[in-house]
Each structure stands twice: as C-alpha cells, then as structure tokens.
Amino acid sequence: MDKNNLGELLYAPTDVLLTEKDKPQPDIMFISKERLDIITDNYIKGAPDLVIEILSPSTGKWDRVKKSRLYYKHGVKEYWIVDPDYKVIEVFTPGEKNWNLFQSYDAEVILVSPLLSGLEIQLKDIFK
C-alpha cells in the first residue's frame, strides 16, 4: 500500500472510536490518503476504509457477528475476514442492509480489492 501511496496501514492495538461506547480494535485497518485526518495520536476517529480481522477460536464469533455489524453500521467500505487455519480470506463489501460477500480467496491467488484501486496481495506470501 505504501508503494502506491494509497494511505496508511495500522495494526492493533489501535482503538477505533465509532461511538462513545463502541471502540473496537481491528487487527489491521487501512485509512485512505484522503481521510488521514481521522487518525489522532490516541485513536482513529470514525470508520476506517478497510478493516481486516484475523479469526481465532476466541474471537471468531465476535469478528463475524458483533464487530461485523458495527463496521457495517458505521460505514467501513470493505471488510476482510482472514481464516489462518484454512488459509482463506473472505472479502465483503456493503450491500443494501448488510455485507455482501464479494469473493473468497485462497493462498493460490492474488487478492484484488474491489474498492481500493491498486491494492493487490499475493496470498501465498501471506499464508507462508
């Protein structure tokens, strides 16, 4: 993302202030260069453009249900769920009332973001 100058990639633990009580910490998030002003010294003020959650046995339900709803409600443009056990990434985009599955990718392909032009990731490099 850096070489294409698309924006800023941030990692947990970084709070995302959606409301006073809703402050999730995505595993990975991306803020486009046009919206870098939402990054403060202490937290992200508002929804990132892209949120990536990495599933684990203790967080799977939370990431797929509760966090997913929060991100959708507050305007995240793209949501990825990474399953490291199966080496699969599901890419979701906002639909009319909920997330739409755009595509599921395995380790053998190049993931191309539907909303973030120029973002391509060779997944075999991720799932080594």
Image (spheres, rainbow, N blue to C red):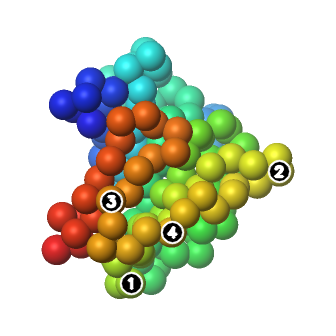
Dot in front, 3 or 1: 3
Q: Secondary structure at mark 2?
A: loop
Marks 4 and 3: in contact by CB < 8 Å? Answer: no
Q: Mark 1 or mark 2: which comes first in sequence?
A: 1
Residue closer to the observer: 114 or 40 = 114
Q: Quadrant of residue 123?
A: bottom left
Classed neighbour count for the residue bearing mark 1: other residues with Cα under 10 Å, few (<14), some (14–19), many (≥20): few
C-alpha distance separating marks 4 and 2: 20 Å
Classed neighbour count for the residue bearing mark 2: other residues with Cα under 10 Å, few (<14), some (14–19), many (≥20): few
Residue closer to the observer: 82 or 63 = 82
Classed neighbour count for the residue bearing mark 4: other residues with Cα under 10 Å, few (<14), some (14–19), many (≥20): some
Q: Which mark is residue 86?
A: 1
Report the quarter where the N terminus lies: top left
Which amino acid does the dot numbered 3 rest on?
Ile
Q: Which mark is residue 94?
A: none
Q: Which residue is mark 2?
A: 97
Q: Secondary structure at mark 4?
A: strand
Q: Is residue 59 left or right of residue 72?
A: left
Look at 43% across and 34% down and name the residue there: 117
Q: Mark 3 or mark 1: which comes first in sequence?
A: 1
Q: Which mark is residue 104?
A: 4
Q: Mark 2 or mark 3: which comes first in sequence?
A: 2
Look at 25% across and 59% down and name the residue there: 122
Q: Is residue 41 visible?
A: yes
C-alpha distance separating marks 3 and 4: 11 Å
